[in-house]
Image: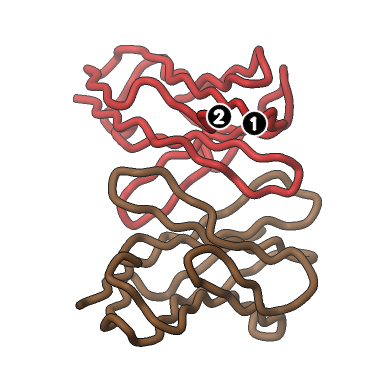
Chain colours: A brown, B red
Amino acid sequence: AQSVAQPEDQVNVAEGNPLTVKCTYSVSGNPYLFWYVQYPNRGLQFLLKYITGDNLVKGSYGFEAEFNKSQTSFHLKKPSALVSDSALYFCAVRDTGGFKTIFGAGTRLFVKA
Amino acid sequence: NAGVTQTPKFRVLKTGQSMTLLCAQDMNHEYMYWYRQDPGMGLRLIHYSVGEGTTAKGEVPDGYNVSRLKKQNFLLGLESAAPSQTSVYFCASSSRDSTQYFGPGTRLTVL
């Protein structure tokens, strides 16, 4: 069965510093991997995805994520954090050929000015 | 292009009452989903649909029913609401490439 783990409930960074939000996954076959962001009282918004190809995926708002097959990880990164990046971030996985996407529990990112 | 819309935005029910949540999408997506979001538990899939007239169970289907009579609409029903169904409900839709587009959510409280 597929699963996703986000080991950190919360990540705190100072504005201008690099940020990393961690995600590991378990899935049979080749994974489709996603990051979504949720701002207060809003639905989730798509940030980026990995399906195949280059292990470094670039997405919206300057975010990127690196797919590491040997470590079954898909960590979200940004070189320089902004206060406006403060939000709840979800990692998600879907196996190829399946219809269901499994979401992690979410990591709350706080960026301090 | 409204994307995914949900009605109502808020609702308070008494235990045992019934209600229907409506989701509509204007992106001609084949797949539609209903999730519930609870603190510390992420999103859990309730039911999903891979096309008009088809539905399937997700992780937490008990106490809910769904219907997809039209491609653009996906209805979630609660036949007899329970306090454990207090949650925020999100609808989403996607095409075959599986990026999901979410509605703004419905906040449901069951007293």
Residue at x-position 33% and y-position 57%: B40
The mark that comes first in sequence, 2 or 1, is 2
Above or below, A5 relative to A73: above
Residue A55 in the image: x percent, y percent? 71, 79
For the residue pair A84 and B29, the one nearer the viewer reads as A84
Residue B35 in the image: x percent, y percent? 48, 39
Quadrant of the drawing holding the N terminus of chain A: bottom right
Q: Which residue is mark 1?
A: B27
Above or below, A50 relative to A80: above
Determine whether the residue tagged by mark 1 lies in a helix, strand or loop. loop
Answer few, some or many: residues within 10 Å of disc 2's Cα (few below 14, many 20 plus, some between 14 and 19).
few
Residue A68 in the image: x percent, y percent? 67, 82
Mark 2 and mark 1: Cα distance apart in space: 8 Å
Instruction: Mark 2 and mark 1 in contact? Answer it, CB < 8 Å.
Output: yes
For the residue pair A37 and A100, the one nearer the viewer reads as A37
Residue at x-position 33% and y-position 73%: A82
Residue type beneath disc 1 = Met
The image quadrant of residue B26 is: top right
Residue A7 in the image: x percent, y percent? 42, 75
Asked if residue A106 lies left or right of residue A65, the reply is left
The image quadrant of residue B49 is: top right
Badge number at residue A111: none
Asked if residue B54 lies left or right of residue B93, the reply is right
Residue type beneath disc 2 = Asn
Badge number at residue B1: 2
The number of callouts visible is 2
Q: Which subunit holds the residue at mark 2?
A: B
Residue at x-position 75% and y-position 77%: A54
